[in-house]
Image (cartoon, rainbow, N blue to C red):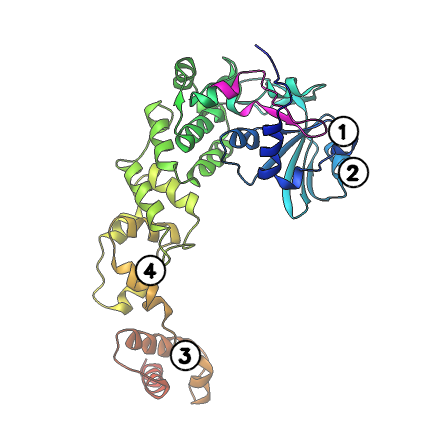
Amino acid sequence: MSSSEPPSPSLAEALGRAYPELATFGGAGLPVYLVGGAVRDLLRRHPRSDIDLVVIGDPAELARGLGAVTIAEHDRFGTAKLHLEGHQIDIARARTETYPHPGALPVVEPAPAIEADLARRDFTINAMAIPLAEEPRLIDPHAGREDLERRLLRVLHDRSFIDDPTRAIRAARYAARLGFAVEEKTLALLRAADLSTVTDDRREAELLRLAGEDSAPEAYELLSGWGLLELREGGVELARRVGELLELPLWQLRAERNRVVHAAATARPGKELELAATDPARPSEAVALMTAYGAVEMVLARAHGAHWLDQYLQKWSQVDLEITGNDLLAAGVKQGKAVGRGLAEAKRRKLDGEIDGRAEELAVALEAARGG
């Protein structure tokens, strides 16, 4: 099996069209490569915006040589983020990895060649590279392009999910996003994976990353089918409804999408069911009720069918008084609980359509403040 292909004008042209900011990328005299998902999606003719580079040498030196603005450097893994011509680019030092025990963070050593770096990666379709400091060609030591054409997800080695079980979550993410089948041996290795060997924080971070994708419900279903994640009853369908809901203009940005989708799929039913079962008789009751619930619970309750929450967002939560506490103080009400009581009563009656306008608000607020 050849580890690389001869120079291809079509590859150079595709690279220039997909990532024009790399068209004249000289690498500042260092061997530098486009790697991973950027290469995979270039070959699929679906280039994504993220750009990952690997350099044989110091990422910071490359950044300085490019005259770029470095955002952050991480010495442990030899990585840097930088801005180049308005684009954010991730640069990593070519490295090898060894794992002291299952689920541990890797021990990293610099690698002398790109092939060694590619050998540490998760799946064949992510283990390809294109050199940028020379004539573009595909470096593909693990037959990733063949698996890409076959729409197949294949792990690089038998210990992959033992060394880093979070790769099993990535397997579900890629298979769902790309619509790929999982190669038979890889599937057996996935079903034997043990996510309990990684910390809760790492596992949660990888699941939240998965939850941010449009295909998250399908990915959760895969993880459940592999025996790696327990879902709530109806969790896949609820996650799907949440995703659709957060596409609607009224509900966009009401909560962090990945956290709500993750909760929909995996969390035990909680206060959102209580909220979904409630049908407030008056707008003021709805506004008072919502003080006890957070954004995630609100979105989940709406996905469960609490349609009155549309009215809450559109109208009731937008209602404000024309008066303030200063108006009550100016009318002789003493500072203290009476001011809050007066404003609350005026707000309640305005929400329920019983009063309108500044004069009526002030009259009601003064009556409630003085009569308490």
Secondary structure of the residue carrying tag 1 is loop
Secondary structure of the residue carrying tag 3 is helix
Secondary structure of the residue carrying tag 2 is helix
Label 4, label 2: how many angstroms apart (C-alpha)?
55 Å
User: Who comes first in sequence, dot 3 or dot 4?
Assistant: 4
User: Who comes first in sequence, dot 4 or dot 2?
Assistant: 2
Residue at the disc numbered 1:
30
Which stretch did the figure color magenta? 126-146
Quick one: 50 or 213, which is closer to the camera? 50
Identify the residue shown where x is 25% and y is 80%. 354
Crowdedness of circle 3 by 10 Å Cα count: few (<14), some, many (20+)?
many
Q: Nearer the viewer, mark 3 or mark 4?
A: 4
Secondary structure of the residue carrying tag 4 is helix
Three-letter amino acid code at the position of disc 3: Val
Residue at the disc numbered 3:
339
Label 3, label 2: how many angstroms apart (C-alpha)?
64 Å
Label 3, label 4: how many angstroms apart (C-alpha)?
22 Å
Quick one: 125 or 272, which is closer to the camera? 125
Q: Dividing the image into 4 quarters, which one contains the N terminus?
A: top right
